[in-house]
Amino acid sequence: MELNTLAWLQTWYSSRCDGTWEHSHGVKIDALDNSGWLVTVDVDDSLHSRTLSEERDDQDWINCKVVDNQFVGAGGPGNLVEVLSIFRSWLTES
């Protein structure tokens, strides 16, 4: 499942690259200093504002939202694939 999610993200990103978009938009995956992940993806207005937050324990949590044409998802150290899967799900639902 992880590879499928990553392959999907790669395909989605490639489909946006038109010689202009990628110079001012993109995908960022960063490590948080409190042991977790931060995913930021620039999207168009096809994604409506929404929020999902779940805290299962100190290491297993997610907080995802869409604000101002940007998906921002954070999660615990083992939740990167889950955050990317939420982005994928929200994008394909809209």
Image: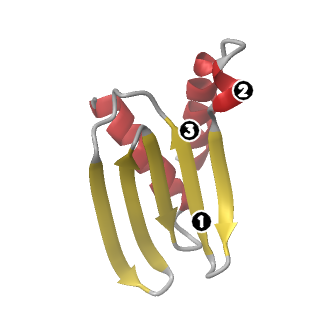
Q: Position of residue 5 (x, y in %)?
A: 54, 41
Residue at x 40%, y 65% (from the top left corner)? 63
Cα separation, mark 3 vs mark 1, equals 19 Å
Which sits in the foreground, 42 or 64?
A: 42
Q: Position of residue 10 (x, y in %)?
A: 64, 31
Q: Residues within 10 Å of mark 1 (few under 14, many from 20)?
A: many
Q: Confirm or deny contact between disc 3 and disc 1 (CB under 8 A).
A: no
Residue 88 position (above or below residue 53): above
As shown in the figure, which amino acid type bears the numbered disc 1?
Trp
- Say whether residue 2 is left or right of residue 23: left
As shown in the figure, which amino acid type bears the numbered disc 2?
His
Residue at x 56%, y 70% (from the top left corner)? 78
**Quadrant hosting residue 92:** top left
The secondary element bearing badge 3 is classed as helix
Q: Residues within 10 Å of mark 2 (few under 14, many from 20)?
A: few
Q: Which residue is mark 2?
A: 23
Q: Which residue is mark 1?
A: 37
The secondary element bearing badge 1 is classed as strand
